[in-house]
C-alpha cells in the first residue's frame, strides 16, 4: 500500500507541528503529554531512553533536564541526526544484550527510564501483543535495576492479555502507576503507556 493511501503515513497536525518545531518525529507530543500529566521530567534528572530512534524523545528530555541533567539513549539502529551536547550519550545496540554498566557509563543510576520501543509487527494481533509485552518487560527490568530511589518509568505496550499482570508488577515497586493514552497516539493504535513514579 502506498504511503499516500496509508493513513498511518498521513501528514497530520502532529507531524506538521513536529517539523515546524524542529523535532525528529511526531511522537514527541506523546511524551510531552505524559510529562504534563505525570510530572515526569525535572531539571537535573538523569534519563535513559530505550529505543530512542528517531530521536524526538531524546530532544524533549534534553530540553527538560537542562545543562545539569544527563540523557542516555540506545537503539538497535543508528540515529540519522543525533542531538549534540556534552550531557547526551547515544549507543547503538540490542537492548536484550547490552550490559547495564554500558548504559550507566559514569552515572550511578537514572532518575527516569523511558521506553517507546515497539516490536516489528506481523499483523497477527496476538503475536504483536506478545512481542510488545516482552519489550516492555525488558524495559521494566532495566528500570528496576537502574533507577534511583524515587525514580520514574514510562513504557509503551500494546493492549492485550499481559497488560494487567505487568501493571501489577509495576505497582509493587511504584506507589503511583497510571495508564496513559496520549492524544498523539493514532486513533486506530492499540498502544498505551504505563507510567510509574516513586520507585522503591
Image: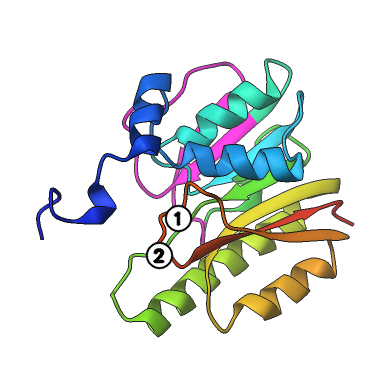
Is any atom of residue 114 visible in this view? yes
Name the residue nearer the viewer: 125 or 153.
Answer: 125
Q: Which residues are magenta?
A: 71-97
Query: In the image, 19: left or right of 194?
Result: left
Q: Is residue 104 visible?
A: no
Mark 1 to mark 2: distance in Å?
13 Å
Q: Residues within 10 Å of mark 2 (few under 14, many from 20)?
A: some
The quadrant where residue 7 appears: bottom left
Sequence-first disc among 1 and 2? 1
Q: Identify whether 111 is placed above or below 82.
A: below
Measuring 36% from the left and 36% from the top, which residue is drawn there?
13
Prevalent SS, magenta region: loop
Eyeballing the image, is 177 above or below 59? Answer: below
Q: Is residue 156 above or below residue 14?
A: below
The disc label shown at residue 119, or none? 2
* Residue toward you, 13 or 69: 13
Residue receiving disc 1: 94
Tag nearer the camera, 1 or 2: 2
Q: Given the current orientation, which residue lies at the most extreme left position?
A: 2
Kindly identify the residue that appears in the image at 68 percent across and 74 percent down: 166
User: Is 196 positioned to the left or the right of 100 in the image?
Assistant: right
Element carrying mark 1: loop
- Residue at image x 54%, y 16%? 85
Q: Is residue 31 above or below residue 119?
A: above
Q: Position of residue 44 (x, y in %)?
A: 77, 24
Where is residue 101 drawn, in percent x and y? 66, 46
Look at the image and say whether residue 40 sits in the magenta stretch: no
The residue sitting at 59% across, 35% down in the picture is: 72
User: x%, y% of residue 199?
Assistant: 85, 54
Magenta highlight on residue 74: yes
Residue 152: give x, y in percent of width and height: 76, 48
User: Which quadrant is home to the C terminus?
Assistant: bottom right
Amino acid at each position: 500500500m502506498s504511503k499516500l493511501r496509508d493513513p498511518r503515513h498521513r501528514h497530520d497536525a502532529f507531524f506538521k507541528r513536529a517539523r515546524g518545531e524542529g523535532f525528529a518525529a511526531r511522537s514527541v507530543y506523546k511524551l510531552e503529554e505524559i510529562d504534563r500529566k505525570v510530572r515526569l521530567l525535572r531539571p537535573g534528572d538523569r534519563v535513559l531512553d530505550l529505543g530512542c530512534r528517531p530521536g524526538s524523545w531524546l530532544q524533549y528530555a534534553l530540553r527538560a533536564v537542562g545543562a545539569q541533567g544527563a540523557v542516555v539513549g540506545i537503539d538497535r539502529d543508528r540515529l540519522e541526526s543525533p542531538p549534540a551536547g556534552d550531557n547526551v550519550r547515544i549507543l547503538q545496540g540490542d537492548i536484550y544484550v547490552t550490559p547495564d554498566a554500558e548504559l550507566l557509563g559514569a552515572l550511578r543510576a537514572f532518575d527516569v527510564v523511558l521506553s517507546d520501543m515497539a516490536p516489528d509487527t506481523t499483523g497477527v494481533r496476538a503475536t504483536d501483543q506478545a512481542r510488545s509485552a516482552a519489550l516492555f518487560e525488558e524495559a521494566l527490568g532495566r528500570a528496576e535495576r537502574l533507577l534511583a530511589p524515587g525514580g520514574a518509568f514510562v513504557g509503551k505496550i500494546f493492549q492485550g492479555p499481559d497488560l494487567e499482570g505487568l501493571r501489577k508488577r509495576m505497582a509493587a515497586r511504584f506507589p503511583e502507576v497510571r495508564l496513559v493514552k496520549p492524544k498523539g497516539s493514532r486513533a486506530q493504535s492499540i498502544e498505551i503507556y504505563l507510567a510509574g513514579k516513586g520507585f522503591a
